[in-house]
Amino acid sequence: MNALAQKIDSFIQKQAKIYLRPGEQPPKGVQVMRGKRGGMFYVATGKTGAVSSSPSPEDATDVLSDYIRTGHRRPPSSLVKAISEKSGLDANFVKRKLNAWSSLEPKYDADRRALHIAAKKLFGVGTMKSSKHDAKASSIFSESKEEHFKLLKTIYNETQQVLKNNNIDKVKLFRGIMVRKGGPLAKGKKKTISPAPLSSWAKDWETALQFAAGYYEGVKKGYDGLVLEIDVPASQIFSMPKLGMGDGQEGEVILLGGEKDVLDVTVMEEEEEW
């Protein structure tokens, strides 16, 4: 484990809140506190307790674990086939679009952007900044508008059915980002944010922390690494890896855009201050 990874691990151990389920007893010697939303928790320090994500009021992340943590980074052929059959779309189209989301390869940049354009038009939510890929992405979308809509509708409907079947109203999720120092979010304030038409969030606080820390590169000079925490309504959850788009190794959950209330912001200092 390199130095930065050790610092991330140390940061987790010092900061993680461990929420107790009804009737659950905390480890001996820890101080139990009540959160602003009424949940009881203790702060894991050193080797005290196991570090895990904070459960939603309905323990939704635990219920959905099999749909979120699938182990695959790219969509398996069985998933491509299932979506193709349900949507009536060509399997090659489905495969390319699912790969476009999960891959960072430049060849997929315009396809990924086209998915955002489709989501913006279909669901009417999300903020889109200009991109050098806009012209090509718009062309891709225009040539297969209905196919894009069918794909997004199929994934969203499947996701919503799973949430409904499990009586889930809200899910607690996390997002790791970097912003310039001194911004309103970087000050640790709660805030309403307006992300892109489709945005990536993590099931686990620890995973989001890695993104906030820039993985092995560290927080860039002049920036703060932030972990955002939200309780998102089920209706805003677009996809989970087992049902469509998303990275099953990182426990990615994709949300629709629109305003979201950030419950908490964990601020990490830039690399030289660690």
Image: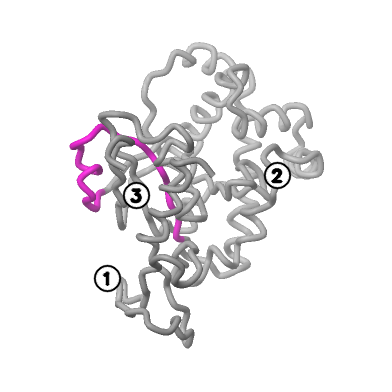
> Separation of disc 3 and disc 1 at Cα?
18 Å
Position of 151 with respect to 32 (left or right) is: right
Q: Which three-letter amino acid code belongs to the residue tagged 1?
A: Lys
What is the three-letter code of the residue carrying label 2?
His
Which quarter of the picture shows residue 196?
top left
Name the residue at 40% across, 68% down: 44
Image height check: is 212 above or below 222? Answer: below
- Residue in view at x 31 percent, y 71 percent: 37
Task: Let me know if residue 179 is in the magenta part.
Answer: yes
Give yes or no for contact between labels 2 and 3 (Cβ–Cβ under 8 Å): no
- Residue 226: image location, x then y, percent: 33, 44
Which one is closest to the eye, mark 2 or mark 3? 2
Name the foreground residue: 36 vs 25: 25
Please state, as top left, top right, bottom left or bottom right, where the C terminus lies in the image. Answer: top left
Residue 101, percent from left and from top: 59, 32
Categorize mark 3 by other alpha carbons within 10 Å: few (<14), some (14-19), many (20+).
some
Image coordinates of residue 19 in percent, x first then y, are 42, 72
Helix, strand or loop at disc 1?
A: loop
Q: Estimate the x, y position of residue 201 in percent, counting from the top left.
A: 48, 47
Chain-order first, disc 3 or disc 1: 1
Q: Is 46 placed left or right of 38 in the picture?
A: right
The tag on residue 36 is 1
- Which SS class for mark 2? loop
First to last magenta residue range: 172-191
Apparent side of residue 152 relative to residue 187 in the rendered image (left or right): right
Label 3: which residue? 260
